[in-house]
Image (spheres, grey):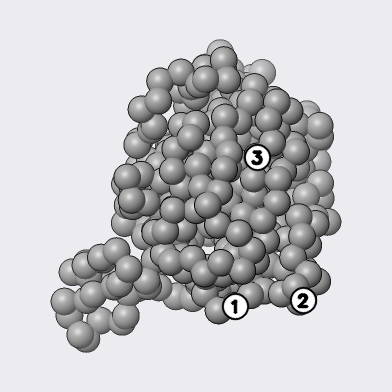
């Protein structure tokens, strides 16, 4: 499987052998002929930071709060005052209060990624911390507790983000200089995620029953009938992925908001494949679009530009509604594409993979005139 390496800016091919055993703080392979296993980071929540926890939001997921943008980092479900542990060893390079919580201040801490003082892990929405700038932090060391997060009447959570210092100097860390540097879930052992994504039905104006895929006139909200397609077409799919089933046992949120019943999050990879069928229904030709990845860093300039490219405009990006409609034809980052087929019969297939390479697929037969 392809995963972002532990250090931003590089891409690593990670081969996890079936017989590989992972232990906290080290990686041990029982077969020396196999490639070395990645020394994955620890989870920041749990009795000692090693229990995977359900996610409220993932990296690259659409948010619609004061305008559409893509979520940077991951929001991990948590209880107020729950202890937070360091996922990696490093040095505290930044610590301050974040005033975005409308009813109480929350603390933000950035810990360097080992000795690399220009890359770090950002822990946000801490009610208190027990570390300060300059402190050395061990892996699994307690660094703070989760604040009661009630901005937007949301849910209590820990925001974890891989960041880099945009100013290029370790002494220049600030809330503005900490830029996104990739998908944090790629730092953790993928074997802990056994939840498969699923294709979600989509309401269509052309059918009384939900459709597996929707087809729109390129860059518009005009829905096309799958038995009568023509021109340049956008293919839209919706997938759900829970990542994990482990949830905090704190009951209802002390902020007065309900505990989220759905943990639907964006997958990590989406790919569209078009198969042209002959008169007997056999596949005559097959073409795959460039895949869409959700493991890359998201810059400030990417935020509004990428949101409509990756998600259909009817998507909703709130905790209470996860209508994740992906534009599967927009495979190339920073550019929009469309399907412009010749007349004929086609099988349109959209495949997705989560961060642990768990797959899901949906397809529809369509007619182009």
Crowd around label 3: few <14 · some 14–19 · many ≥20 (10 Å): many
List the single residue furthest toward the bottom: 33
| Residue depicted at 39% across the width and 59% down the height | 140
Tell me what residue is drawn at x 51 percent, y 47 percent: 144
Q: Secondary structure at mark 3?
A: strand
Q: Which of pointers 1 and 3 indicates the residue nearer the eye? A: 3
Q: Which element carries disc 1, helix, strand or loop?
A: strand
Q: Name the N-terminal-most of marks 2 and 3.
A: 3
- Which residue is label 1 attached to? 116
Q: Are marks 1 and 2 in contact (CB under 8 Å)?
A: no
Q: Which corner quadrant of the image does residue 148 belong to? A: top right
- Quarter of the C terminus within the rendering: top right
Q: Which residue is mark 2?
A: 168
Percent x, y for residue 262?
Answer: 47, 27
Q: Is residue 191 left or right of residue 102?
A: left
Q: On residue 106, which mark appears?
A: 3
């Amino acid at each position: 499987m392809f995963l972002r390496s532990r250090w931003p800016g590089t891409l690593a091919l990670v081969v996890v052998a079936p017989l590989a055993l992972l232990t906290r703080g080290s990686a041990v392979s029982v077969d020396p002929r196999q490639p070395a296993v990645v020394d994955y980071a620890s989870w920041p929540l749990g009795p000692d930071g090693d229990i995977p926890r359900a996610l409220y939001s993932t990296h690259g997921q659409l948010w619609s709060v004061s305008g559409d943008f893509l979520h940077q980092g991951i929001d991990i479900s948590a209880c107020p005052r729950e202890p937070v542990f360091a996922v990696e060893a490093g040095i505290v390079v930044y610590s301050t209060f974040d005033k975005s919580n409308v009813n109480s201040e929350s603390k933000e801490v950035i810990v360097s990624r080992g000795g690399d003082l220009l890359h770090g892990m950002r822990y946000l929405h801490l009610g208190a911390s027990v570390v300060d700038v300059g402190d050395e932090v061990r892996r699994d060391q307690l660094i703070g507790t989760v604040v009661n997060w009630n901005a937007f009447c949301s849910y209590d959570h820990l925001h974890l983000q891989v960041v880099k210092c945009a100013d290029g100097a370790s002494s220049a860390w600030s809330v503005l200089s900490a830029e996104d540097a990739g998908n944090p879930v790629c730092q953790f052992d993928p074997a802990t995620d056994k939840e498969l994504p699923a294709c979600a039905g989509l309401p269509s104006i052309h059918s009384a029953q939900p459709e597996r895929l929707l087809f729109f006139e390129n860059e518009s909200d005009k829905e096309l009938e799958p038995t009568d397609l023509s021109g340049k077409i956008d293919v839209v799919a919706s997938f759900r992925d829970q990542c994990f089933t482990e949830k905090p046992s704190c009951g209802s949120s002390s902020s007065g908001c309900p505990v989220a019943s759905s943990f639907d999050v964006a997958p990590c990879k989406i790919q569209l494949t078009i198969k042209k069928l002959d008169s007997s229904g056999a596949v005559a030709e097959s073409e795959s679009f460039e895949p869409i990845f959700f493991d890359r860093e998201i810059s400030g300039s990417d935020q509004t530009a990428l949101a409509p490219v990756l998600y259909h405009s009817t998507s909703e990006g709130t905790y209470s509604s996860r209508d994740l409609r992906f534009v599967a034809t927009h495979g190339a980052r920073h550019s929009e594409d469309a399907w412009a087929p010749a007349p004929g019969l086609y099988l349109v297939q959209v495949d997705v993979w989560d961060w642990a390479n768990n797959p899901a697929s949906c397809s529809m037969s369509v007619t182009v005139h």
